[in-house]
Amino acid sequence: MKIVIGIPAFNEEKNIGVILTKLKKISKDIIVCDDGSSDLTAEIAKGLGANVISHKRNLGYGAGIRTIFLKAKEINADILITFDADGQHRIEDISTILKPMTNDEADIIIGSRFLVENNEIPKYRKIGIKAITSITNSSIGKKLSDSQSGFRAYNKKILENITPSESGMGVSTEILIKASKKKFRITEVPIVVSYEGDTSTQNPVSHGASVILSTMKFTSIERPLTFYGIPGMILFSIGLFFIVWTLQIFSETRQIITNITLIGIGGIMIGILFLMTAIILYTTVNVVREKRN
């Protein structure tokens, strides 16, 4: 069984050497995606025997994951483990994440920071991750505890059927939405993380915004009738209610209440726009899928 470890890295010269030295004891097949680093990340990784793919400029975490997916598929990996380069993850947890994968218990294994009590996660991160995970869960119809963990294992079926397209941090959610749509099995195992020192280069606000926008985009594509249709029906109903109210007032007083009328007209127009968008997008998506098949 060919186990490949993929590491997206951006300016990680202080961590990459130590991490690669330890990872080489587990697998000789290590892919490092140097995402436009301005330091010695790529040189150090190459010197330690990693398969280094460099982006000419910084494209984002998601672009790094996409490059790793494509390379892992190219070299015929049976299992791909994605591992962060910032020193948060423990090498010994790889065996934990590999066990259910080698036993064919799931197609995606997520290393969850919230299944271990002694993980000292900063409060602001804990709140943000849980909020984003709740949004992700509502999109995939599954209850996960840590949808944003970068420590994951993917089997061959995932590599052959899913190609990430998001360039930012929303890629973690994108993969889960696509996997859920294709009925792949997703599960979690407990891992321990370290937040000592400066281990994250991603602004939590931009991270959250990226994930929310990504979730909205893929939900609107995968479930357009739900995403646009339900709000459209609600807005149309509200608008219709205010229009009926306007007509009732007019029949009794011969006066038109401008504010009520405008709310009614606006609700109906926006509701119709949402409903038309739902129908058009649903039709377009299905036509594209039929052509692909």
Image (spheres, rainbow, N blue to C red):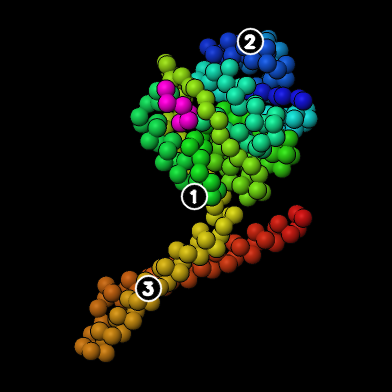
* Residue closest to the eye, 18 or 60: 18
Marks 1, 3: nearer the viewer: 1
SS at badge 1: helix
Say whether residue 283 is magenta: no
In magenta stretch: residue 116: yes
Q: Depth check: 134 or 251 in front?
A: 134
| Residue drawn where x is 63% and y is 50% of the image | 181
Q: Is residue 195 something that shows in the picture?
A: yes
- Name the residue located 37 percent from the left edge and 26 percent from the top edge: 122
Three-letter residue code for mark 3: Gly
The residues tagged by marks 2 and 3 sit, at their Cα atoms, a distance apart of: 64 Å
Distance in Å between CA atoms under marks 2 and 1: 40 Å
Of the two numbered discs 1 and 3 on the same chain, state the one appearing first in sequence. 1
Where does the image place residue 201, in percent across and percent down from the top left?
47, 25
Boundaries of the magenta span: 113-118
| Residue identified by numbered label 2 | 21
Q: What's the residue type where badge 2 is placed?
A: Thr
